[in-house]
Structure formats: structure tokens, C-alpha cells
Amino acid sequence: MEEVKPGERLYEVRIILRDVQGAIAKAAQVLADANVTIKTGTVFYILGKPELGTWASFIDISKATLNIQDLEKKLQGLDEVADVRFEEPKPAPYEVMHFPVLHGNSRAIIVGRDTFAALWDGFEGILTPSGLEAVLYNVGKRIGTHTAMGLKDTYGLENKDLMSAIVQAAKALGWGIVEFQDIDFQSLTGTIIVKESFEARARQKKPYKMCHGARGYFAGCMGVVFGKPVEAVEVKCLGTDAEHCEFRIRSNI
């Protein structure tokens, strides 16, 4: 969602550009010449069409010297532009032009932290604490294994390179800021620090460690990194007022 300030008139524009040098600059110049304010923007290639890319932006046209129809004509007149679409995001300023949302080549969804909190609260109302712990850990482990295998197979990554990609994925997907420490490939042990864990933040303060999903996730990831099954134990939790979450990896004996 985009923030709308008083007096702004918000639109979203999606421009399909041919992959030639200066394409974005020329499209942006058309908007600038018409006194359109570009608020945010994203650029990405179109799957299956490497010759094309998409530039999507929220724009403010409250002070524009051209209407939407004339802006569309000017953009369509550029050799670099294959297609243009404008949409006024009403009644709420949602970004709607990127459906389906993709994570790599896979369809993804965006789920708010509060939604996860409601989900966990629902589980806690049905399952015993130990039952909920087992469910979250095993689900997390499957997700971690799937994520690490996807990174390994897609990009040919192993060992420290695979761990670096896991750090990137965790940050990009909102899981948290991950740091690996004292990873030993012989003993299959190590420590994983997670700052701003979404799981701890979603569930708020509890008198017990709560990041069972993340614990399973990192056990799954490190099982792929090591090439052998491992388990993870949470020794510190942000949800119990620790400065961060900390997980110890150990061999699965």
C-alpha cells in the first residue's frame, strides 16, 4: 500500500518497456515534463519474455499539466514503450498491478504479521503447548529444507555461499536479520543469531521461548547445507526480552 498525503491524487502506472538502453529514463522524462511526481517504483523482467521489462510506479498527478489519456498517448509514442496502463487505486491505495506476486519463479502471497499472530493464537486454543511446538517446528523444517534446496538447485550454491543466500532470503522475505557463527562442518554444529525475528514480534511477549517455526526453518536449511539432518534449539528469544533470538545447531543423533 502507498501513503497518500493531503492534496495528492494517486495513480499507479505500469509501463512495459523494451530492453534497450535509456528506456526508463525516457519514460520518466515524459512524466517529469508533465509535472507528474513519481512516488515509488519497481523494475523487473517479465518471465518468458527477456526482451521486455516492467516499470510500475505510484504517481501523484495533482499538479500534472496533462490528463491521464494524454500521458498515455505520449508514453505509447515512445519507441521504447510496448504498452502502458494507468489505474487509480480506489478505495484503498493498494499496489494491484503485479498480480500474481512472485518469489523467484514461484507464485507468492504477502501475509501480515498480525495475520500470523491470529493464526498462532488459534493453534494455541486447540493444541497443547507441546503439540503446537511440534507442529510449528516440523512445518518450519519443511519450509527451510524447501527453501535451501531451491537456492542450491537453482543457483548451484553450496556451503558458505548457500548460507549467504539463506541470509539474503531471510531478510528479503521479512523473516529477520540472520547471522551465522561458529559453523563447523565436521561436527555439524553452529550458532544462528536472528535479529528482529518476525515470529517473536508477531507473538509479542511470552514467558517462554516461542520461535519454533524459525527453529525448524533453520534446522531444515542447515540440514541441506551440511548434507545431513540436524536439529535446532532456541537458547535466547526476543519474545522473552532477550536482545535477539539465538539458535544452536546440533547433529541429529
Image (cartoon, grey):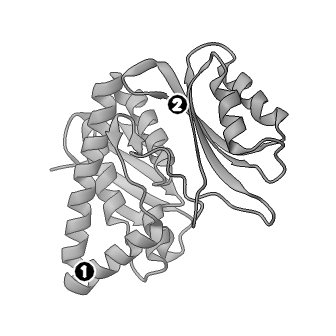
Whether residue 70 is situated above or below residue 22 in the rendered picture? below
Q: Position of residue 216 (x, y in %)?
A: 28, 56
The residue lying at 39 percent from left, 57 percent from top is 247
Whether residue 241 is situated above or below residue 97 in the rendered picture? below
Give the left or right position of residue 103, taking residue 62 as reference: left
Along the viewing direction, whichever of 167 and 160 lies nearer the viewer: 167
Whether residue 249 is situated above or below residue 13 in the rendered picture? below
The residue lying at 27 percent from left, 50 percent from top is 143
Q: Which residue is mark 2?
A: 44
The outermost residue toward the top is 20
Q: Position of residue 130 (x, y in %)?
A: 21, 77
The residue lying at 25 percent from left, 53 percent from top is 141
Residue 232 appearing in the image: no
Q: Position of residue 237 (x, y in %)?
A: 46, 68
Residue 195 appearing in the image: yes
Sooner in the amino-acid sequence: mark 1 or mark 2? 2
Q: What is the secondary structure assignment of the residue under circle 1?
A: helix
Give the left or right position of residue 155, taking residue 129 as reference: right
Along the viewing direction, whichever of 128 and 126 lies nearer the viewer: 126
CA distance for labels 1 and 2:
43 Å
Q: Which residue is mark 1?
A: 129
- Three-letter residue code for mark 1: Pro
Along the viewing direction, whichever of 201 and 108 lies nearer the viewer: 108
Give the left or right position of residue 140, taking residue 196 as reference: left
Quick one: label 2, few (<14), some, or many (20+) residues within 10 Å?
few
